[in-house]
Image (spheres, grey):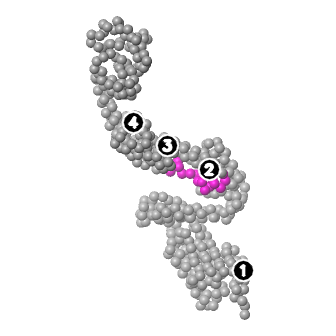
Amino acid sequence: MDNPSENLSQELIVLKSIYPEVSVTPTEISLRIDITPERPVELLLKPYIGDDEKVVRRTTSKFVDGIKFFSKLPVNTNTYKITSSWINRRTMHNIINDISEIIREAVENDMMDTVLYSICNYMLNEVSVKYLDDICENYSISTSKDSDFLKLERMFAKARLYNFRQNRFECSICLNVQDGAEEGILLDCEHSFCKKCFKEYAEVIINDDDVSKLQCPNCPPKNYQKLDQMNRNELKEFLFTRIFPRRILSQVISQELIIKYENLLNNQSFEKYKQFYPFSATECPRCNNWVFRDDLDDKLTRCFKCFFNFCFDCNHSWHGTVNYCGRKLNNVPLHVIEELTSENPNSVLRQKYEQMYGKHNIKLSIESHLSDLMFEEAIANDESLVKCPHCTTVITKSDGCNKMKCFVCSKNFCYLCETLLSSDHPYEHFTDLASKCYNKLFQGMPGMEDMQNNVQFM
């Protein structure tokens, strides 16, 4: 009588020769079935399943993870398992039922010596045909969980890279055909390069500090012409989406260069972003890390690198909402306020400015501007009121000469022309023949004009 283990070993050798994809040992068998969709599969993140219109995020892929079959030997209905990182339970259940049926028929017909052939043939030749639409769920997968979306997105990337490494490719720079598993770099745009060419290309651009040019040489460059037409989220995604993520760069260049690339690109992106939305980003005054601001009307700004809380208006440590800023560094530009307070303000432009500076900030700035205009008018109509030319404090002149001293900043200035005067010799302004206020120290003081020529200044 033949030894069962010898018969099984011979069977596996023949099986391996027929199906090279199969991995076998004397006690185990495993097999990966690649799935090739007829068209790209779309992955959607929705607020909740059933919403057919609103989509938070989406991505597509021509490559998906395969199905894995594993079994202890000899095989029976209790020794095998089928696994997949993404295929729906209904389809997996159907595949499991089909394999169990193959095993049951082999037992009933006393054909267990060929059952592994039947299973391998089914997995490699029938599953992807019979269940392709069910596997791909009509080529669209929806989830309402961020974690599931990220998991499936990683699966897409892994399947795409797996497919690339199983084949040869042509480098888009040197045009040589090489082995994807050993020498290839595959970009998200589907263009591929040999590691040597990509390394030289990336290092030259990063060392020249012109990191915005580090793009796929086969793809059209980023179009920076319509940035002013993007809202905050669109511009953020456009500027801060990395063309070359760390997982690609780390395959060819040093960690030091990667850090340099990311820092330069980050700073350039923030500078560009702030040109269009100046109140939506700022530098931390403690560590110089860039910080996004989502609520433009909330002055409290928190750096998530050094955890410093500071005021956006004055850049000092957070002083609460009751205490006012000593001096504002971030203000709504005057031309914006003037445009919004014109006779026929543009409603579209107003919405744009509210995105840039915040609705509440616009409102407060307009109120402050109108108040300042009224105050300026009051000053212009009241000769006893004058502004300090240094700190703009309004000062009342009730009597005395025209040499004024601000009670806030202690600066000397001329009441007549509002010129700042020398701290050591403030009266020279009235004795200098070239001064337009020469001999006018007491001008405007009742009964004092006759004394002007008899006064000697120290």
Measure the alpha-carbon separation of dots 3 and 2: 24 Å
Q: Residue at x 67, y 65 (%)?
A: 166
Q: Is residue 450 left or right of residue 191?
A: left
Q: Which residue is mark 3?
A: 286
Q: Position of residue 46 (x, y in %)?
A: 44, 61
Q: Amino acid at mark 2?
A: Ile
Residue 50 in view (yes/no): yes
Q: Which residue is mark 2?
A: 258
Q: Residues within 10 Å of mark 4 (few under 14, many from 20)?
A: few
Q: Nearer the viewer, residue 41 or 308?
A: 308
Instruction: Establish if 241 lies above or below 104.
Output: above
Q: State the extent of the magenta-drawn residues as a range.
A: 237-253
What type is the residue that disc 1 sits on? Answer: Ile
Q: In what element is the residue under mark 4? A: loop
Q: Which residue is mark 4?
A: 326
Mark 3 is on which residue type? Arg
Sequence-wise, the earlier of marks 3 and 2 is: 2
User: Percent x, y for residue 204?
Assistant: 67, 45
Disc 1 and disc 3: Cα gap in Å? 68 Å
Instruction: Give the residue at x 43% y 59%.
Output: 54
Quickly name the residue at label 1. Answer: 13
Q: Tell me the kind of residue under disc 4.
A: Gly
Q: Compare residues 199 and 213 and report the one nearer the observer.
A: 199
